[in-house]
Image: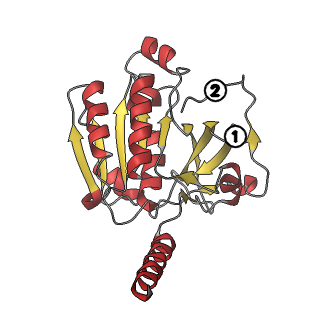
């Protein structure tokens, strides 16, 4: 009886220690206005998120990629990130400037969107990854559900970066339902020079949280992320409440 009680106590202590060592289930932006708008105080880990650009960025995804790189730079450092894509235009120095070190990046080049989605699903089974990223144009609802379930099972965070090659595909896919916890739209704004110095200043973004499970659509004007992956609100907006986006009712599929 004494040995059984001791074994039970050891199991309890081990379970408590495991819970204490588990990482937070959200990654804060460390910007109060942003974290207040997100359930749990940050971007949820171990689920699927969707990001896209606006206008010309819907095709190349440059601004959304930079925003994502800042998140990945702070997510489960120093674990590797699996990046799946069909093209060959991922810019390593640009990612490094946002804090995502090249040695953390594992790249898989697939033949098409279907291959990217299959590589993502395989990658989400590897629990030692910080995140899995996939660049796709077409994201069927069933495929997004599979990615969401795979992320939930492994605890690895998944990001789908939408890149649309034609206006027809973009129009069809923008409002298509996906099983993602959040949907973000990132667009570039004119940069501003600081301290009166001439030249190009730090880039600014309009960051729109279009959909959020358990939250409301919101948008912010942000300074682009720095070399540590952190963002900041534009100085004149830092003390204001976030702007709510007035949209038609939507339904997230999960």
Indicate which disc, 1 or 2, sits on the residue closer to the N terminus. 1
- The local crowd at label 2, few if under 14, some if 14 to 19, many if 20 or more residues have their Cα within 10 Å, is few
- The local crowd at label 1, few if under 14, some if 14 to 19, many if 20 or more residues have their Cα within 10 Å, is many
- Residue 125 appears at what percent x and percent y? 30, 47
Task: Name above or below for residue 203 compared with residue 177.
Answer: below
Q: Secondary structure at mark 1?
A: strand
158 or 171, which lies in front?
158
User: Which residue position is annotated with label 2?
Assistant: 251
Q: How far is the residue under mark 1 from the one under mark 2?
A: 16 Å
User: Which part of the image, by quadrant, shows the N terminus?
Assistant: bottom left
Q: Residue furthest front?
A: 1
Q: Is residue 7 left or right of residue 88?
A: right
Report the residue at 50% width, 70% height from top.
Answer: 19
Q: Residue furthest right?
A: 240
- Residue 30 appears at what percent x and percent y? 61, 63
Q: Secondary structure at mark 2?
A: loop
150 or 73, which lies in front?
150
User: Which residue position is annotated with label 1?
Assistant: 218
- Residue 44 appears at what percent x and percent y? 54, 51
Report the residue at 47% width, 54% height from top.
Answer: 71
């Amino acid at each position: 009886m004494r040995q059984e009680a001791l074994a039970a106590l050891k199991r309890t202590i081990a379970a408590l220690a495991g819970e204490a060592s588990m990482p937070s289930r959200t990654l804060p932006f460390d910007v109060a206005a942003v974290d207040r708008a997100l359930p749990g105080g940050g971007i949820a880990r171990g689920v699927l998120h969707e990001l896209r650009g606006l206008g010309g960025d819907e095709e190349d995804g440059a601004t959304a990629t930079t925003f994502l790189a800042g998140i990945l730079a702070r997510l489960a450092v120093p674990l590797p990130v699996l990046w799946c894509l069909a093209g060959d235009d991922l810019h390593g120095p640009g990612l490094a400037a946002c804090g995502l070190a090249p040695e953390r990046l594992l790249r898989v080049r697939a033949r098409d969107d279907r291959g990217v989605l299959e590589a993502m699903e395989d990658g989400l089974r590897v629990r030692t990854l910080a995140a899995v990223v996939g660049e796709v144009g077409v994201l069927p609802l069933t495929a997004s559900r599979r990615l969401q379930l795979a992320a939930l099972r492994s605890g690895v965070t998944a990001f789908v970066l939408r890149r649309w090659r034609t206006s027809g595909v973009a129009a069809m896919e923008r409002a298509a339902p996906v099983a993602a916890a959040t949907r973000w739209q990132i667009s570039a704004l004119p940069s501003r020079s600081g301290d009166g110095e001439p030249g190009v200043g730090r880039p600014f973004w309009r960051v729109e949280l279009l959909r959020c499970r358990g939250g409301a659509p919101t948008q912010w004007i942000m300074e682009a992320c720095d070399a540590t992956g952190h963002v900041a609100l534009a100085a004149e907006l830092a003390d204001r409440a976030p702007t709510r986006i007035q949209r038609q009712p939507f339904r997230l599929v999960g």
